[in-house]
Image (spheres, grey):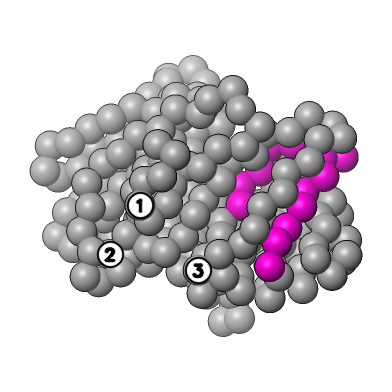
Amino acid sequence: MITPRTTGQCGKADYGWLQARYTFSFGHYFDPSLLGYASLRVLNQDVLAPGAAFQPRTYPKVDILNLTLNGEAEYRDSEGRHARAKAGEALLLAARPGVSYSELNFSKTESLTRMQLWLDACPERENTPLQKFTLRNEKHQLLASPDGSQGSMVLRQQAWIYYIALDEGEQFHTDLHGSRAYLQSIHGCVHTRTGTEQKTALTCGDGAFIRDELALTLVADSPLRALLIDFSC
């Protein structure tokens, strides 16, 4: 079963220095039926004004994946680590209690656009505090996984995050690890096919809850950039 979550249904915020779209409850946006999905707690798209910053703050024990779409971000933590990520790069932060994290739009003249995902971390697992991944010129690639397979970043959770880049008419097929997955279109239109031959069309910015399917096929109706988060349960 595939259930769309259109961009028009998402929560939104406009603070001047920050424009945001929230798939799940976040900040002032609250929907008790949308507190997350499987281990995915947050899926936001944010646009930060030139020079804008999130001040240092702490997080629960989650893995935070930031994928920069436009501009350049700078991240710092209270233990002295820092890194930058420009368009086409992703950072994975293994948030820990007692450590604060800040984020800055490094440019004084250009906006920063990025996707941010939070996934609950397994309580017994620890990980490298900061990992970085540079997108390759490939149709699909594994950004993060539990074991770092295919050169991916390592999650503290049984989830697999794919970045998909298809030209119009191209397809991506994958078997799913468990009964749930989530698909997010970043740019472009796509329709999905499952083993039950169900078809669902998504436009730019739409997402979809995927339940009880063994496999999934994506067909790009226009040049497509998307994320697929595949959960083992």
Amino acid type at circle 2 is Lys
Q: Position of residue 24 (x, y in %)?
A: 57, 66
Amino acid type at circle 3 is Ser
Q: Residue furthest bottom?
A: 32
Task: Give the foreground label among 2 and 3.
Answer: 3
Q: Residues within 10 Å of mark 2 (few under 14, many from 20)?
A: some
The residue pinned by badge 1 equals: 147
Main SS of the magenta part reads strand
**What's the residue at 28%, 30% (across, down)?**
83
CA gap, disc 3 and disc 1: 13 Å
The answer to which of marks 2 and 3 sits earlier in the sequence is 2
Figure check: 92 above or below 7: above
Figure check: 60 above or below 72: below
CA gap, disc 2 and disc 1: 19 Å
The answer to which of marks 2 and 1 sits earlier in the sequence is 2
Q: Is residue 189 left or right of residue 44?
A: right
The answer, for residue 219, to whether it is visible in the render is yes
In magenta stretch: residue 222: yes
The residue pinned by badge 3 equals: 232
Q: Compare residues 213 and 32 and report the one nearer the observer.
A: 213
**What's the residue at 87%, 35% (across, down)?**
169
Residues drawn in magenta: 214-228
- Residue 61 — which label? 2
Question: SS of the residue at dot 2?
Answer: loop
User: Does the CB distance between marks 2 and 3 fall below 8 Å?
Assistant: no
CA gap, disc 2 and disc 3: 19 Å
